[in-house]
Amino acid sequence: MAEQRIGVAVLGLGNIGGAVARALVHDASALERQSGLTLELVGGFARGPEYGERAGIGRERVSSDAEALIDDPQVDVVVEVLGGEQPAAALISRALAAGKHVVTANKEAVSKHLPAMLAAARDGNSALMCEASVGGGIPLLVSLRQIMATNRIERLRGIVNGTTNFILSKMDAEGADYAPTLAEAQALGYAEPDPTADVEGFDASYKLAILASLALGRHVHPQEISRTGISGVTALDIADARARGGTIRLIAGMQRTDDGATLSVAPTFIPNDDLFSRVMSNFNAIEIVGDRVGPVLLHGQGAGPSPTSSAILSDIIEAARAGSAASLRLGE
Ligand SMILES: NC(=O)c1ccc[n+]([C@@H]2O[C@H](COP(=O)([O-])OP(=O)(O)OC[C@H]3O[C@@H](n4cnc5c(N)ncnc54)[C@H](OP(=O)(O)O)[C@@H]3O)[C@@H](O)[C@H]2O)c1
């Protein structure tokens, strides 16, 4: 028998929120066996009850008032999966200040508003958790934290955007040009109808900003990152990389320097003997280099409802177990 009941609210019942809410309702007994906690979906916030039907959790659990749902005394953990900067960032800070732990997959809101969120978490003695916001299902932030307990992070390097990796690996495999490959990625659902955030490197810069904030112990705003997307990469560039014994990938990188760090997102030549050249399709890979441990490489599915909800559910459980001690923090 589980000892502790944890009430969860899910803000946003789209791809990811729907999967999380569905797991809370339909996989409750497996999650209880695995975690020893009883996770209970108190409600989901969406524009209308039809979102609950679509997510497979029924219409009656859907609320159209996010603030009332956050304030519900039954709610211990708020999962924010609305996406975008606002109202997501304001709702996250409100929940944290009210003493609710927040689990989010929203890299844009976290990377831009991290100081306000951490201040709200301190006020509310609550935890901000965002494992799913970088690297989807890969246990990346937890690994970074574990490594940082005894290491100075010298370097980070990542393929952190599945859409651009899908496009670049397909261009390489087929010798195809950028525009038709983007159109194919859109048709297959690997790229959004408006692909700007992915192909121009914004999404990767949000993720790098979160990683670099943790590694450097200060808030790194995405605007500090030098950013070049992949829309200028041609079939000729890829053929040229091949002739030189490699390929091109969109790399998000941080390199520590004497007076700080260089931070960039850019299409980068990767030699064939580098493991990153074998990161295919929508997979992600992140290399963390610590001064004691040396290079550590993590590889896995960086997106999709199942891997992403895995990270979110783990964060809910960790916040319920450890409380504010589990929270993301900067250099303390
Ligand atoms: N998809 C992935 O594989 C993945 C992986 C890692 C992280 N994430 C992150 O997870 C978050 C959610 O992504 P997603 O793929 O689930 O997006 P999504 O399918 O678009 O879901 C977002 C949901 O939130 C709703 N929503 C947004 N703003 C709202 C508002 N102001 N009021 C009421 N409802 C609102 C949307 O409703 P409408 O559709 O009616 O606008 C939609 O149902 C994002 O931050 C994303 O970056 C996604």
Image (tube, rainbow, N blue to C red):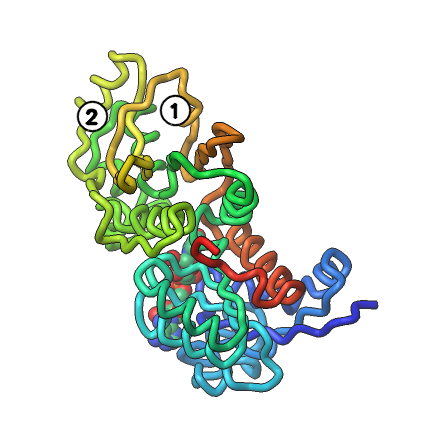
Q: Which residue position holds label 2?
A: 235
What crowding class fits label 1: few (fewer than 14 Cα within 10 Å), some (14-19), or many (20 or more)?
some
Tally of marks: 2
Secondary structure, mark 2, is helix
Residue at 71% across / 74% down in the picture?
A: 5
Q: Which residue position holds label 1?
A: 277
From the viewer's perspective, is 236 left or right of 322? left
**Mark 2 within 8 Å of ligand 1, using the beta carbon:** no
Mark closest to the chain's N terminus, 2 or 1: 2
Residue at 67% across / 64% down in the picture?
A: 321
Judging depth in this view, the residue of 14 and 53 nearest the camera is: 14
Question: Marks 2 and 1: which is nearer the front?
Answer: 1
Furthest residue toward front: 258
The quarter of the image holding the N terminus is: bottom right
Judging depth in this view, the residue of 144 and 95 nearest the camera is: 144
Q: Quadrant of ligand 1?
A: bottom left
Q: Which mark is residue 158?
A: none
From the viewer's perspective, is 226 left or right of 104? left
Could you tell me residue 86's position as x and y percent? Answer: 31, 71
Image height of 56 relative to 238, above or below: below
Amino acid, disc 1: Ser
From the viewer's perspective, is 281 left or right of 53? left
Judging depth in this view, the residue of 290 and 43 nearest the camera is: 290
Could you tell me residue 203's position as x and y percent? Answer: 31, 50
Secondary structure, mark 1, is helix
Amino acid, disc 2: Ala
Image height of 48 relative to 242, above or below: below
Judging depth in this view, the residue of 210 and 77 nearest the camera is: 210
Could you tell me residue 68's position as x and y percent? Answer: 48, 87
Cα distance, mark 2 to mark 1? 17 Å
Residue at 27% across / 53% down in the picture?
A: 222
What crowding class fits label 2: few (fewer than 14 Cα within 10 Å), some (14-19), or many (20 or more)?
some
